[in-house]
Image (spheres, rainbow, N blue to C red):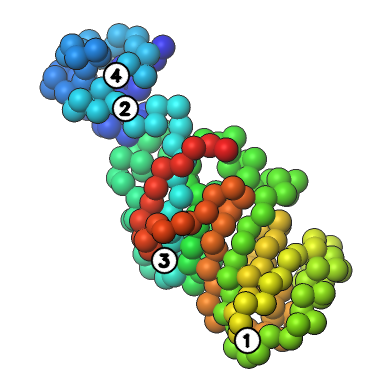
């Protein structure tokens, strides 16, 4: 059970100050009956707002198809941010919605966004062992030898002390390959190719753990179930 005013503001329907007025507006109901007391305790699953169930009362998890050119921070100094692509209501939620890990500004593809702190930890901890699948376009023809080089588990990136864990490379065409990694080091895919003399010209993530981009259009988001 949650206090109605606190529930509405934590789900981003209003600020804490606005909650009393919002409840008085008649838009909040339980079983079709208008609720008017902002401080009453309610079961979040029984409440409607404008006759719709409350949005993700137990925590929100969504996938976003990030376009290249968007940054994964709240800092607007370097161009558009992924948060501009999400509903304002999600950004007013408390805890706020944040991305699970990051993609580089120039990388497109699947980004998870959530307000469930334990999920962020579960998916980003070094022990998480979550498969991330990328499609990379490179600047010159790929060498089949790269498949072994990336698979061996002894690839060292400049400035790092531990080799990258084995990664699966599938060459799709002369200059396109699909790479599956389980780590999430800084610029990892670009640096793995760079270490062997290839420059990644385009990078796109098509899968993150159990989540697939499917036919979600660039810039669009979709709710998913926590796996
Ligand atoms: N590896 C990269 O180099 N960039 C990303 O955005 C993700 C993985």
Element type at marker 4?
strand
Q: From the top left corner, tell me how far across and down residue 194 is, in percent.
A: 69, 80
Q: From the top left corner, tell me how far across and down residue 125 is, in percent.
A: 69, 46
Q: How many C-alpha atoms fall within 10 Å of the one at disc 3: few (<14), some, or many (≥20)? A: many
Q: From the top left corner, tell me how far across and down residue 28 is, in percent.
A: 21, 20
Mark positioned earlier in the residue sequence (2 or 1): 2
Gap in angstroms between the C-alphas marked 2 and 3: 29 Å
Task: Decide if residue 38 is in sight here.
Answer: yes
Look at mark 3 in the image and give the residue it sits on. 67
Look at mark 2 in the image and give the residue it sits on. 54
Query: Residue at image x 81%, y 68%?
Result: 151
Q: From the top left corner, tell me how far across and down residue 118 is, in percent.
A: 59, 35
Quadrant in the picture for the N terminus: top left
Look at mark 4 in the image and give the residue it sits on. 47
Q: How many C-alpha atoms fall within 10 Å of the one at disc 2: few (<14), some, or many (≥20)? A: some
Look at mark 1 in the image and give the residue it sits on. 174
């Amino acid at each position: 059970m949650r206090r109605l005013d606190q529930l509405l503001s934590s789900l981003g329907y209003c600020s804490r100050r606005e909650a009393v007025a919002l409840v008085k507006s008649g838009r909040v109901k339980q079983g079709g009956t208008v609720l008017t007391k902002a401080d009453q305790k309610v079961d979040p699953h029984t409440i409607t707002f404008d006759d719709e169930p409350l949005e993700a009362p137990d925590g929100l998890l969504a996938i976003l198809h990030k376009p290249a050119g968007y940054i994964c921070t709240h800092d607007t100094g370097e161009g558009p941010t992924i948060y501009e692509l999400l509903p304002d209501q999600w950004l007013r939620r408390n805890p706020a919605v944040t991305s699970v890990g990051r993609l580089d500004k120039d990388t497109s593809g699947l980004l998870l966004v959530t307000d469930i702190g334990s999920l962020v930890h579960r998916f980003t901890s070094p022990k998480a062992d979550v498969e991330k699948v990328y499609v990379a376009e490179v600047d010159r023809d790929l060498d089949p030898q790269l498949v072994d080089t990336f698979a061996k588990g002894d690839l060292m990136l400049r400035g790092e002390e531990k080799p990258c864990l084995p990664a699966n490379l599938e060459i799709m065409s002369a200059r396109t390959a699909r790479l599956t990694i389980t780590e999430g080091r800084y610029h990892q895919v670009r640096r793995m190719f760079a270490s062997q003399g290839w420059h990644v010209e385009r990078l796109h993530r098509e899968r993150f753990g159990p989540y697939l981009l499917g036919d979600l259009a660039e810039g669009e988001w979709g709710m998913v179930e926590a796996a």
